[in-house]
Amino acid sequence: MLKNLWILAALALAACGGPAEQAAETDPSPSGEPAVSQAAIAEPELVATSDAAGAPATGRFEIGVHYMRLSPTQPTSSNPDQVEVCEVFWYGCPHCFNFDPLLKGWLETKPDNVSFVRVPAVWNPELQLHARAFYTAEALGKGAEMHDEFFREIHERGNELDSEAKLQAFFGRFDVDAAVFKTAFDSFEVHAKLQRADELSRRYRIQSVPTIVVNGKYTTGGGQVASYEELLALVDELAAAEGAGR
């Protein structure tokens, strides 16, 4: 019992959390632009039960402790023959920053039938601003080039990138002029992706980052395992079980 309490206390430090009520805040949209939609949707429940075909078979991980089941399973954006692994993250989260290098290593060795996607968390205006920056970089074809640098700028250089002006200057270092940045930043494409991120965060019941969602069915994160290496081992098991069930 004491061991379990110690583990839970230690793991509480392994994720950045946000109050559920912050999900109702709107994004810092330009004047006249609709805010991120907060329309009611049918939200699934997180449950600690699993069908026999879906749970990892090694016995190393326990549902309700290391991962949870989304009920009902949520649709994914990946091809039907692929198992989707989705990371919900925030550039300002130190745990996401520490996890990212291990995740990059995992991406180099993941099975071919596993599709990986990133979704930025959007539960308050600061996160929404960083999410808008993530999608702006993606819209400009700069996503891969800038991803690591967003983390480094915030966590190594101390620039929180907490305003549009700071983001504009940051993008300028990647040969994006102010007008091009502004057009992409305020674009319908970026706003639509923010709305989608908001919907997914609520469908996935996101309460902290980093959170990993496997195939719209299972969720896990840094607060549920002993290390990020263990988190990725769990993701491998869940993805393999999902792939075997197809």
Image: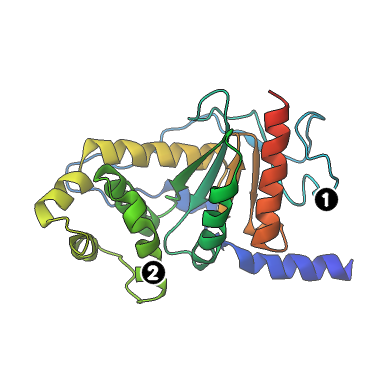
Residue occupying image coordinates x 65% and y 52%: 232
Q: CA distance from mark 1 to mark 2?
A: 34 Å
Q: Could you tell me which secondary element the residue under label 1 belongs to?
A: loop
- Image height of 212 relative to 6, above or below: above
Residue 86 placement (x, y as % from top left): 53, 42
Q: Is residue 144 left or right of residue 52?
A: left
Question: CB of mark 1 within 8 Å of CB of mark 2?
Answer: no
Q: Which quadrant would the C terminus be assigned to in this image?
A: top right
Q: Which quadrant would the N terminus be assigned to in this image?
A: bottom right
Residue 9 placement (x, y as % from top left): 72, 69
* Neighbours of disc 1 within 10 Å: few (<14), some (14-19), many (20+): few
Question: Which dot marks residue 60?
Answer: 1
Task: Looking at this view, name the residue that lies furthest to the left.
Answer: 179
Task: Looking at this view, name the residue that lies furthest to the right.
Answer: 1
Task: Looking at this view, name the residue that lies furthest to the bottom.
Answer: 157
Residue 4 placement (x, y as % from top left): 83, 65
Total numbered badges shown on the rendered structure: 2
- Work out whether residue 239 or residue 24 is closer to the camera in this orientation and state it: 239
Residue type at mark 2 is Arg
Residue type at mark 1 is Arg
Residue 241 placement (x, y as % from top left): 73, 34
Question: Which dot marks residue 200?
Answer: none
Check disc 2 and report the residue beneath it.
Answer: 152
Q: Is residue 38 left or right of residue 105?
A: left
Residue occupying image coordinates x 69% and y 65%: 11
Residue 207 seen in render:
no
Q: Could you tell me which secondary element the residue under label 2 belongs to?
A: helix
